Amino acid sequence: AQIGQVAYSDGIKRETGTKASEE
């Protein structure tokens, strides 16, 4: 994972402001 982003177990990186509460 990078700063401002969250890496999901499926390998897809999404911004922390986008569906951050979902996997």
Image (tube, rainbow, N blue to C red):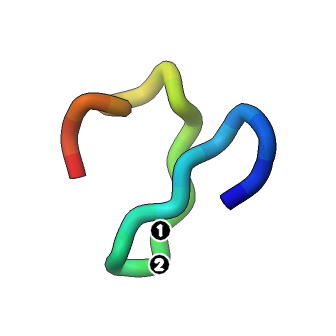
The label on residue 12 is 1
Q: Residue furthest left?
A: 22
Q: Tag 2: Cα neighbours inside 10 Å, few (<14), some, or many (≥20)?
A: few
Residue for badge 2: 11
**Amino acid type of disc 1?**
Ile
Residue at the location (52% across, 47% down)? 14
Q: Tag 1: Cα neighbours inside 10 Å, few (<14), some, or many (≥20)?
A: few
**Amino acid type of disc 2?**
Gly
Callout 2 secondary element? loop
Q: Residue furthest right?
A: 3
Query: Dividing the picture into quarters, in which one does residue 10 lie?
Result: bottom left
Residue at the location (20% across, 40% down)? 22
Q: Are marks 2 and 1 in contact (CB under 8 Å)?
A: yes
- In percent of width and height, residue 9 lies at 35, 75
The quarter of the rendered structure image containing the N terminus is: bottom right
For the residues labelled 2 and 1, the Cα–Cα distance comes to: 4 Å
Q: Is residue 20 left or right of residue 22?
A: right
Position above or below: 9 against 7: below
- In percent of width and height, residue 21 lies at 25, 30
Residue at the location (49% across, 20% down)? 17
